[in-house]
Image (cartoon, rainbow, N blue to C red):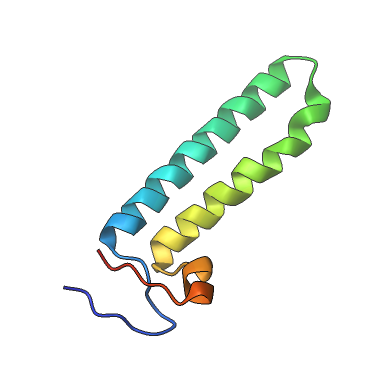
Amino acid sequence: MVEYAAGRCNIGPRGRMRRATGGIILLAIALAAAWWLRTTDARDWTLLLFFPLFVGFVSLFEAALGFCVIFAERGVYDLR
């Protein structure tokens, strides 16, 4: 059983796995979209890739560190 440590960990193993999976999926989608935009004439739309890349990397950092800023702001911790 994982114990809560204030300011260190507020996401349990299940939450970490969900964030890691979501981050990898978003990065794969962004990579596929970047490839598709490069092969078509829609290169002006590549700036929109910022959003899935940002959320994907934030999800991976949260999974790696076990800390969610939104959970910390709300005073929630889920160590399941």
Furthest residue to the right?
44
Q: Nearer the viewer, residue 65 or 71?
A: 71
Left or right: residue 67 compared with residue 36: left
- Taking the spot 65% from the left edge, 29% from the top edge, the residue there is 34
Above or below residue 49? Residue 4 is: below
Left or right: residue 13 compared with residue 48: left
- Taking the spot 75% from the left edge, 32% from the top edge, the residue there is 46
Above or below residue 50? Residue 60 is: below
Q: Position of residue 44 (x, y in %)?
A: 83, 28
- Taking the spot 37% from the left edge, 72% from the top edge, the residue there is 77
Above or below residue 22? Residue 58 is: below
Furthest residue to the top?
40
Q: Position of residue 58 (x, y in %)?
A: 54, 56
Q: Position of residue 41 (x, y in %)?
A: 80, 15
- Quadrant of the image for the C terminus? bottom left
Q: Nearer the viewer, residue 2 or 77?
A: 77
- Quadrant of the image for the N terminus? bottom left
Q: Position of residue 45 (x, y in %)?
A: 78, 29
Left or right: residue 80 compared with residue 25: left
Furthest residue to the left?
1
- Taking the spot 30% from the left edge, 80% from the top edge, the residue there is 4
Above or below residue 78? Residue 55 is: above
Numbered-mark total: 0
